[in-house]
Image (cartoon, helix red, strand yellow):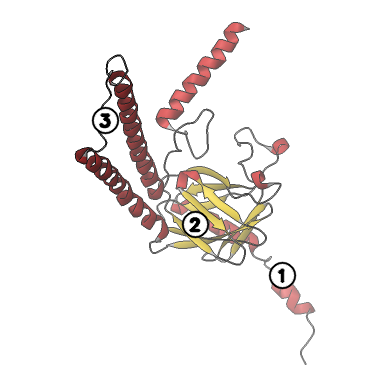
């Protein structure tokens, strides 16, 4: 029993180290994950780079303050410094502790503003989809592809397939092509929700009576998961988002299949015309 517990702990530590170094293996969180999920869009790549920069700055500042405190405690101990200094001002020190934080803020603000601009300004979109939040599911529309529309619900625990993650899998996935600039219009019909995909670097509120927009340009095929990240009611944690990124050819094939499935039967118009009352 003791050896099995040790094995579980060691396995957990190994997973933690792998998650720290590599991040999540795909478009979903993993146990013991510390780092951000791998980027699937240019925006998320910039977010990861900015996060790395901020982390380095935090570590350097923390190490400097810790070293300064240690030096102060050691140097100004009453045994080593029985007569304390009565210095109250030092122009050089005051200039340094004013200028250095300003330089650090400039180092942070320049890439921060660039990232905010990149997230906010949408390039010329090649296609548009619309996401509508409900309590507690999502509706998706493809206005550029014949008005394809479907609802997306979370897969219950008792219906999950072996490869489907709990609380993240949906019965109908969003399908998007890779290497395509996709504009996403987001709104809601009841309360405020939030359309969030960590691997895309996308997080935008779905507000009733208002249409917000964001964009993605997925770089690699795969299945990416997200969730509503705005507290929207008792089932807030049960309205996931699943995006299936496919090649452009596969996307066109999927669109054709959806349009064919939505089209009325071949003889429906003739039957309706035969039974319709005459205008005369």
On the picture, is 102 further left or further right than 277?
left
Q: Quadrant of the C terminus?
A: bottom right
Label 3 crowd (10 A; few <14 / some 14-19 / many >=20): few
Q: Residue furthest top?
A: 2
Spatial CA span between label 3 and label 1 = 97 Å
- The residue under label 3 is 86
Drawn side of residue 168 relative to residue 55, left or right: right
Residue 248, which numbered label?
none
Q: How many marks?
A: 3
- Secondary structure under tag 2 reads helix
Residue displayed at 29% across by 22% down: 71
Q: Which residue is mark 1?
A: 268
Tag 3 secondary structure: loop
Comparing 216 with 136, the one in front is 136
Residue 274 place in picture, x, y as percent: 76, 78
Give the foreground label among 3 and 2.
Answer: 3
Front tag of 1 and 2:
2
State which tag comes first along the sequence, 3 or 2. Answer: 3
Residue at image point 63% right, 45% down: 170
Residue labelled with disc 2 = 252
Residue at 47% across, 58% down: 214
**Rendered image quadrant of residue 61:** top left
When the figure is inspected, residue 83 is found, relative to residue 150, above or below; the finding is above
């Amino acid at each position: 029993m003791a050896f099995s517990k040790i094995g579980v702990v060691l396995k957990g530590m190994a997973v933690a180290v792998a998650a720290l170094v590599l991040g999540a293996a795909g478009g979903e969180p993993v146990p013991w994950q510390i780092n951000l999920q791998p980027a699937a869009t240019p925006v998320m790549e910039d977010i990861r780079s900015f996060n790395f920069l901020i982390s380095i700055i935090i570590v350097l500042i923390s190490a400097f303050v810790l070293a300064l405190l240690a030096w102060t405690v050691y140097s100004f101990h009453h045994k080593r410094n029985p007569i304390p200094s009565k210095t109250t001002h030092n122009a050089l020190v005051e200039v340094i502790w004013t200028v250095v934080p300003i330089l650090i803020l400039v180092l942070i603000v320049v890439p921060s503003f660039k990232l905010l601009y990149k997230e906010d300004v949408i390039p010329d979109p090649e296609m548009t989809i619309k996401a509508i939040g409900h309590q507690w599911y999502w509706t998706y529309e493809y206005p550029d592809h014949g008005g394809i529309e479907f609802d997306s619900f979370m897969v219950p625990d008792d219906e999950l397939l072996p490869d489907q993650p709990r609380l993240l899998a949906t019965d109908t996935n969003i399908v998007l092509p890779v290497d395509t600039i996709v504009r996403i219009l987001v709104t809601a019909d009841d309360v405020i929700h939030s359309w969030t995909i960590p691997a895309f670097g996308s997080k935008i509120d779905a507000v009733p009576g208002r249409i917000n927009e964001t964009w993605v340009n997925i770089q690699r095929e795969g299945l990416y998961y997200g969730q509503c990240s705005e507290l929207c009611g008792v089932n807030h944690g049960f309205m996931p988002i699943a995006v299936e990124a496919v090649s452009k050819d596969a996307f066109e094939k999927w669109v054709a299949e959806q349009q064919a499935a939505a089209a009325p039967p071949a003889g429906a118009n003739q039957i309706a015309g035969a039974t319709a009352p005459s205008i005369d």
